[in-house]
Structures are given as structure tokens and as C-alpha cells.
Image (spheres, helix red, strand yellow):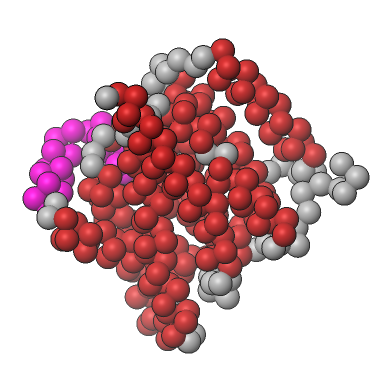
């Protein structure tokens, strides 16, 4: 039964990384919208998406119960708040990197991220690695170091993306709630800030909803589902498999993003002679 759960978890996690790997194409269609505004829309429409998903699945009572339990559990409350802030930071920086043609450095961040996840799994959750996993981890670390040093400057975008998402995965492991309820609570924490920012943009007439065409509006609304669906599958996977295994699966997303960066973006990570 446990092995079956781990297989299901690996499938869920792998699918989430597949979606994340191709998601830069979606954000490229919104490169005429400011990164802050895209982030606010992602948060707001993700919350709306989760609101209706919980309504359809009949989990409102469970959400209410979890919120009551959080009030009396400082550890879980901290994990929820941390998860919300970490993923929001990750979202903003990733969108900004994609829309400023820095997709390759963004993909480097997600090559570093699995190493962060594996280390957190071993150091915080006391997870054990097999000899093959240690060997794979070592090879991956060497490869990432070579690429990072060849980049020519300190890859702060990559480092921030890696650490923020690695810590987000750890927070999800510690939170231990239903994936739909957990994501709803995470977006609930930062939705008031997102609404405030969107109201501010609307009041001074700079909101993309007002100044761009219907296609931009639909893309911004669709950002809710584009954000929530991969996170839901990630949460389902994170609940079933060790954080270290989650780390190894993460190479799916940056590989796809790297290919997109090479064939779609004009960025160059290293000289052609390398």
C-alpha cells in the first residue's frame, strides 16, 4: 500500500513539474503587463478558482475546521504563513525573469532547487538516501556548480528561486493538510494584499483590465487555474513521497524551461564554444 502511494505521489509530482516546465509560454503572452500586476492577478484568481473548487467538492466545513485548528497551533500557522509568502515571492521573481528574457537563469534556479530540497529532506526531516541517490546527488551538484560558475555573474535570481521553492516544499510537508484546503488557505493569506494593489491600479487608471483587450483579461483570469492546478498536483505529490525524492523529480521542470529558453528566448547561458 505504501509503495502504491509513493508511485501515485511520484506521478502527481511529475505531472506538476511538467506543467511548470511549459508555463513560461503562458507568461510570455502577458509580457506587456507588469510583473506586480500579474502576481496580484495570480493570487486573486487562484483564490477564486479554489473558492469554487471547494464549493464543488463540498469541503467548506473542512476548511472552517482547519482554520480553527490553525489558530491554536502556532507551528502550523507559521508553516502556512511561510508557505504563502515563499510561493508569492517565487511567483513574482519567476514571472519577472520570464518577462525580462531571463528564462535560462530561471531554469538554473530550478536545477539548484532539487539540491536544496534534498538537503532540507536530510537535515530537517532526517530522510535517508540510498548509495545511488547520493551518487546522483553528487553528480547533479557538480553539474549545477559548473553551470553556475560559467554564468559570468552571481545568479541571484536562480538562488532566490531555488531557496524559496525548496523552503515552500518543506513548509507543505510540515503543514499536512488536504491539498485543496491548504492551497486555499495559502492564497487567502495574501489575497487582501492582491486586491488592494488591483484596486490601486484601477483607481489611477493603469489596470490592464481597463487598458488592454479582452485577450489580456482572459489570460489574467486564466492565470488562476494556470497557477492553482500545478500547485494542487505538487501538494498531492508532496504528501505522499519524501522531500528528497520530490527534489530529484524537480529536474523535469527546469529541463523543459531550459529548452524553451534556448529555442524561444534570445538569452545565451554560455559561449557556443563551451
At x 66%, y 27%, the residue is 141
Would residue 77 be seen by someone viewing this image from the given angle? Answer: yes
Question: From the image, which quarter does the N terminus lie in?
Answer: top left
Point out the residue furthest to the top here.
131
Q: Is residue 125 above or below residue 258?
A: above
Q: Position of residue 58 (x, y in %)?
A: 12, 55
Q: Position of residue 203 (x, y in %)?
A: 37, 82
At x 57%, y 39%, the residue is 251
Q: Is residue 84 above or below residue 102?
A: above
- Pick whichever, 90 or 219, lies toward us: 219
Would residue 205 be seen by someone viewing this image from the given angle? Answer: no
Q: Position of residue 48 (x, y in %)?
A: 27, 65
Q: Is residue 226 left or right of residue 60?
A: right
Q: Is residue 64 left or right of residue 151?
A: left
Q: Is residue 180 left or right of residue 201?
A: left
Q: Position of residue 188 (x, y in %)?
A: 26, 55
At x 38%, y 72%, the residue is 221
Q: Is residue 79 above or below residue 197?
A: above
Q: What's the magenta bit mostly, secondary-structure-wise?
A: helix
The picture quadrant where one finds residue 243 is: top left
At x 46%, y 33%, the residue is 246
Q: How many marks?
A: 0
Residue 165 falls inside the magenta stretch: no
Residue 61 falls inside the magenta stretch: yes
- Pick whichever, 10 or 260, lies toward us: 10
- Pick whichever, 58 or 51, lies toward us: 58
The picture quadrant where one finds residue 94 is: bottom right
| Residue numbers of the magenta segment | 60-81
Question: From the image, which quarter does the C terminus lie in?
Answer: top right
Q: Is residue 139 above or below residue 106?
A: above
Amino acid at each position: 500500500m505504501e509503495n502504491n502511494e509513493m508511485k501515485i505521489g511520484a506521478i502527481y509530482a511529475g505531472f506538476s513539474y511538467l506543467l511548470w516546465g511549459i508555463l513560461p509560454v503562458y507568461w510570455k503572452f502577458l509580457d506587456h503587463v507588469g510583473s506586480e500586476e500579474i502576481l496580484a492577478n495570480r493570487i486573486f484568481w487562484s483564490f477564486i478558482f479554489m473558492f469554487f473548487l471547494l464549493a464543488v467538492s463540498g469541503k467548506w466545513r473542512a476548511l472552517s475546521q482547519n482554520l480553527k485548528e490553525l489558530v491554536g497551533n502556532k507551528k502550523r500557522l507559521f508553516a502556512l504563513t511561510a508557505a504563502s509568502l515563499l510561493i508569492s515571492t517565487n511567483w513574482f521573481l519567476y514571472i519577472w525573469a520570464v518577462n525580462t528574457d531571463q528564462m535560462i537563469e530561471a531554469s538554473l534556479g530550478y536545477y539548484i532547487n532539487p539540491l536544496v530540497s534534498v538537503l532540507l529532506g536530510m537535515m530537517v526531516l532526517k530522510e535517508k538516501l540510498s548509495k545511488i541517490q547520493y551518487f546522483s546527488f553528487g553528480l547533479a551538484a557538480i553539474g549545477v556548480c559548473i553551470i553556475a560558475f560559467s554564468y559570468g555573474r552571481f545568479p541571484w535570481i536562480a538562488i532566490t528561486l531555488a531557496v524559496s521553492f525548496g523552503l515552500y516544499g518543506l513548509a507543505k510537508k510540515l503543514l499536512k493538510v488536504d491539498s485543496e484546503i491548504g492551497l486555499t488557505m495559502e492564497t487567502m493569506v495574501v489575497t487582501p494584499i492582491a486586491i488592494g494593489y488591483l484596486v490601486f491600479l484601477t483607481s489611477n487608471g493603469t489596470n490592464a483590465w481597463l487598458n488592454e483587450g479582452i485577450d489580456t483579461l482572459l489570460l489574467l483570469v486564466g492565470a488562476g487555474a494556470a497557477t492553482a492546478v500545478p500547485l494542487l498536483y505538487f501538494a498531492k505529490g508532496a504528501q505522499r513521497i519524501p522531500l528528497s525524492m520530490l527534489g530529484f523529480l524537480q529536474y523535469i521542470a527546469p529541463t523543459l524551461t531550459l529548452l524553451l529558453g534556448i529555442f524561444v528566448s534570445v538569452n545565451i547561458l554560455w559561449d557556443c564554444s563551451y
